[in-house]
Image: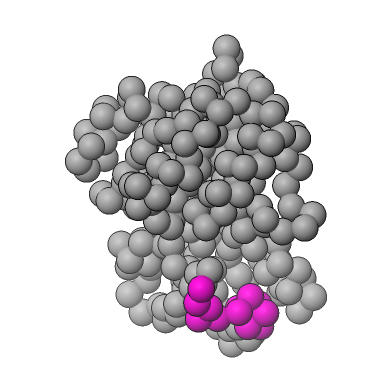
Amino acid sequence: MVSLVGAGPGDPELLTLRALRVLERADVILHDRLVPNAIVALGAPAATREYVGKTRDETVCTQVAINARLVELARRHRYVVRLKGGDPSIFGRGGEEIEALIAANIPYEIIPGITAALGCAAYAGIPLTHRALAQQVTLVTGHQASAQGGPDWSTLAGRQQTVVFYMGVAEIATIERELLIHGRAADTPVALIENGCTPAQRVVVTSLGALTVTAASTAIKAPALIIIGEVAAFGGALQQLNHLALGVAA
């Protein structure tokens, strides 16, 4: 049996009760780079823990190797937990791992977690929707921003919506350029949330037309989320309250 478990966006207190119970029963825990050590430590004391993290510039374990490892471990152990930052079904490659498990006839379940867009926005004081400002939310992976066949920029540039880019720090210049070219206003608010939902959280609010310059001047680094839309302006007004709740400095 394999459980694909969402660890949430960083704060261990955002872990679901179901996820905690599964971790406490695990024989093996395969965990990603963005899963805090405090959450990995919640697993059964006797459980084997394996790090299978990936970054843009360094791959400890390829996705193909991770898929094979899940199958191998599930055949050797009673219970395997695949622990992923955020939610396993949102930019977590959970679908690829499910395909491998199905092909190997191994039973699995998905235990959802709070995805970064929800958690980081909340901890920055940003409502992703607002009756007067944003009637829809689009989640986009920044990895494909400059690739052929990437996002539909015309759709993303539409008004009255919030666009959230995951893994987009390296593509900030492309994101700014393409959205401006396709009609999004230069004064559209943008929030950059670095290390969201952790004591190291940092929120920088700027505008779309100044996005690249601001990211460079403030040295924004991954992991960081990019929230584009009128609601991002709330990050400047309300984040102090949320920082107090999280116990970090504004």
Which residue is drawn at the image coordinates 33% and 75% (left, top)? Answer: 45
Rendered position, 100 above or below 230: below
Rendered position, 78 above or below 167: below
- Percent coordinates x, y for residue 165 in the rendering: 57, 45
In screen coordinates, is 4 left or right of 20? right
Task: Please tell me how many numbered marks the rendered image carries.
Answer: 0
In screen coordinates, is 148 left or right of 55? right
- Percent coordinates x, y for residue 241 in the rendering: 27, 27
- Percent coordinates x, y for residue 81 in the rendering: 52, 69
Quadrant in which residue 64 is drawn? bottom right
Which residue is drawn at the image coordinates 53% and 49% (left, top)? Answer: 172
Q: Please tell me whether residue 7 belongs to the stretch shown in magenta.
A: no
- Percent coordinates x, y for residue 159 in the rendering: 66, 23
Front-most of residues 207 and 226: 207
Quadrant in which residue 178 is drawn? top right
Front-most of residues 159 and 110: 159
Q: Taking the image as drawn, is residue 6 in sight?
A: no
Check the picture and name the quadrant holding the C terminus: top left
The residues colored magenta run 57-68
Which residue is drawn at the image coordinates 42% and 33% (left, top)? Answer: 206
Check the picture and name the quadrant holding the N terminus: bottom right
Rendered position, 176 above or below 234: below
Q: Taking the image as drawn, is residue 88 in sight?
A: yes
Q: Please tell me whether residue 59 belongs to the stretch shown in magenta.
A: yes
Front-most of residues 58 and 78: 58
Which residue is drawn at the image coordinates 49% and 53% (left, top)? Answer: 169
